């Protein structure tokens, strides 16, 4: 097997080779690093490549494996989105504000993956502070879609999705506030999952919108997704919103038939402006699910058209509060040429933040200001209740819902950057799940005009097992990964 | 909805200390007007008698026992400070 073939395996295929001693973790890591050297100047998926850390961790992993002391992810190279803290390794949020910030501690997910023997090859590029849908808001450089380098990988976890698709790592962790794992997963032809809010600890995740943010895996198949979720899920006393819940073994839910399951198809998710190829792939996918024994039926979630407005009040409001901490005093970028404390604060934020971050801070401050609070923020929170209730009602009747992940396939770089509202519409199918706190996964569902389409499966609160079962059965029945997704570059 | 005015955006820029030029304020005014128009669809929804949701899961204050545990080392915590003096962060004068 060539190094390139090795680098394109799934994490579980790589683990099998490690178990059989056919390859070592150091060799696997070298294969990923070689792939990074080959493609990274064209893809731009990494803010930082941690070569030395990776090779050291790989050596330790090989010792674990030799002792017979290996966990399911031991020795497998991975990436973390650059919004997840890594002790001693800079964590930038792709912002000038944190360009040289080196966290003094690890995020809980980092700690858990390290404990499971993971090998960190680097930190993934993203839209600045996770605000965006194309990774063009990175203050450093845009990421390119491995399927077509003139197109965006989606966002904000564009680096993680592109790196997994291009074979630069075996899996990555992203963060999803309104679709930032699932939409880039769809656009890059990989699996991307947002767990139930509170299932995965947010300790050490740089905050954007705290009531919506959730960390989740980007992987090459559904089995890897379940395996990574096993490693990161579970209660953490350091995150007060973490659910007291003992997660099951998610790989046990991977079955290939769907007999007895009821799957709803929400009619409001076939939105105006959806590309015909995306709609066709979604309808074909529903037929596949029926063939696997699922009973499907149309459902209505009437408040869906209001979700975008709710999101663009709540997320900027929380962002404006969270990003107030960047004052150039304690850490991060600090403008030194200034006349006074206030002048220094203003120059720090003027130079440290990019346009989209400023736009959201100002929008959130407006929505929270006296005289507008009731009309915007409180109103959005009330509609949030309606959206949540509608999901609860529908999940009384159905075990899962299926929709397209994104209304379009990957679009060309620069084509939506001048119009923020057009960019926001990319997330119209994914953000309702964040508003309600329910889990969602995007799995490859074929190609439209040669570019990947994602199928989104939504589960009920803590309904990850059923959701993964549907995703796995669909993947095994269609096998789009084997047909298209192996080496787009 | 009335479009947001130049002065309102300028005021927001001052409140949030993001330091915008007049040209940037003008562009932001157009973009915010467009976004706020889109957001105004919420006025169509009847939310009388609907309680607001702050979090999708029940969140309550989490208490822990008052047990002393080691803090992060001072060196590690101060390593990112732009200006420091001994074990303190140096700041500009607040009262002049």
Image: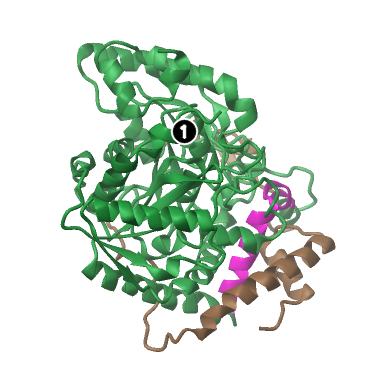
State which quarter of the image contains the C terminus of chain A.
Answer: top right
Q: Is residue A145 above or below residue A356?
A: above
Q: Nearer the viewer, residue B49 or A87?
A: B49
Can the viewer see residue A178?
Answer: no
Residue at x 63% of width, y 36% of height = A149
**What residue is disc 1 on?**
A164
Chain letter, green: A
State which quarter of the image contains the N terminus of chain A.
Answer: top left
Q: Position of residue A64 (x, y in %)?
A: 26, 16
Q: Nearer the viewer, residue A375 or A228?
A: A228
Chain letter, brown: B
How packed mark 1 is, by other alpha carbons closer than 10 Å (few <14, some 14-19, many 20 or more), is: many
Q: Is residue A164 left or right of residue A471?
A: right
Magenta stretch bounds: A347-370
In the image, residue A357 lies in the stretch drawn in magenta: yes
Secondary structure of the residue carrying numbered label 1: helix
Q: Is residue B63 above or below residue A94?
A: below
């Amino acid at each position: 097997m060539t190094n390139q073939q090795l680098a394109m395996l799934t994490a579980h295929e790589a683990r099998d080779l490690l178990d059989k001693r056919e390859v070592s973790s150091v060799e696997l890591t070298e294969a990923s690093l070689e792939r990074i050297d080959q493609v990274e100047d064209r893809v731009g998926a990494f803010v930082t490549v941690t070569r030395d850390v990776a090779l050291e961790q790989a050596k330790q992993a090989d010792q674990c494996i030799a002792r017979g002391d290996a966990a399911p992810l031991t020795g497998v190279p991975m990436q973390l989105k650059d919004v997840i803290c890594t002790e001693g390794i800079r964590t930038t949020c792709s912002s000038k504000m944190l360009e040289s910030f080196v966290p003094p501690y690890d995020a809980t997910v980092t700690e858990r993956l390290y404990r499971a023997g993971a090998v960190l090859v680097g930190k993934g590029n993203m839209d600045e502070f996770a605000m965006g849908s194309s990774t063009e808001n990175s203050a450093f450089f845009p990421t390119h879609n491995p399927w077509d380098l003139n197109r965006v990988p989606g966002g904000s976890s564009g680096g993680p999705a592109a790196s997994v698709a291009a074979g630069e790592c075996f899996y990555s962790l992203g963060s999803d506030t309104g679709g930032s794992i699932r939409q880039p997963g769809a656009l890059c032809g990989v699996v991307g999952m947002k767990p139930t809010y509170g299932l995965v600890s947010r300790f050490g995740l740089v905050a954007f919108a705290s009531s919506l943010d959730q960390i989740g895996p980007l992987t090459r198949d559904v089995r890897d997704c379940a395996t990574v979720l096993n490693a990161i899920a579970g209660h953490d006393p350091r995150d007060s919103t973490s659910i007291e819940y003992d997660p099951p073994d998610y790989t046990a839910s991977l079955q290939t038939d769907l007999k007895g399951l009821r799957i709803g198809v929400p009619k409001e998710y076939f939105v105006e402006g959806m590309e015909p190829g995306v709609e066709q792939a979604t309808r074909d996918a529903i037929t596949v699910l029926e063939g696997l024994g699922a009973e499907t039926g149309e459902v209505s979630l009437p408040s869906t058209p209001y979700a975008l407005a709710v999101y663009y009040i709540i997320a900027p409001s929380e962002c404006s509060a969270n990003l107030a901490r960047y004052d150039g005093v304690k850490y991060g970028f600090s403008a030194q040429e200034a006349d006074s404390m206030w002048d220094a604060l203003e120059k720090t934020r003027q130079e440290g933040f990019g346009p989209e971050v400023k736009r959201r801070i100002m929008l959130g401050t407006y929505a929270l200001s006296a005289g507008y609070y009731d009309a915007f923020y409180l109103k959005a929170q009330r509609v949030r209740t309606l959206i949540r209730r509608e999901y609860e009602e529908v999940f009384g009747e159905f075990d899962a819902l299926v929709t397209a992940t994104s209304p379009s396939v990957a679009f060309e770089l620069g084509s939506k950057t001048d119009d923020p509202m057009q960019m926001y519409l990319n997330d119209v199918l994914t953000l309702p799940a964040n508003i309600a706190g329910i889990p969602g996964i995007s799995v490859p569902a074929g190609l439209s005009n040669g570019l990947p389409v994602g199928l989104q499966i939504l589960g009920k609160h803590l309904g990850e097992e059923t959701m993964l079962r549907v995703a796995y059965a669909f993947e095994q029945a269609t096998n789009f990964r084997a047909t298209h997704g192996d080496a787009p570059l | 909805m009335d479009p947001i005015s130049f002065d309102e955006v300028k005021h927001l820029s001052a409140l949030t200390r993001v330091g915008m030029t007049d040209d940037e304020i003008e562009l932001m005014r157009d973009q915010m007007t467009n976004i706020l128009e889109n957001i105004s669809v919420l006025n169509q929804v009847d939310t009388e008698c609907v309680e607001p949701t702050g979090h999708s899961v029940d969140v309550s204050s989490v208490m822990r026992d008052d047990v002393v545990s080691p803090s992060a080392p001072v060196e590690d915590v101060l390593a990112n400070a732009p200006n420091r003096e001994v074990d303190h962060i140096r700041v500009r004068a607040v009262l002049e």
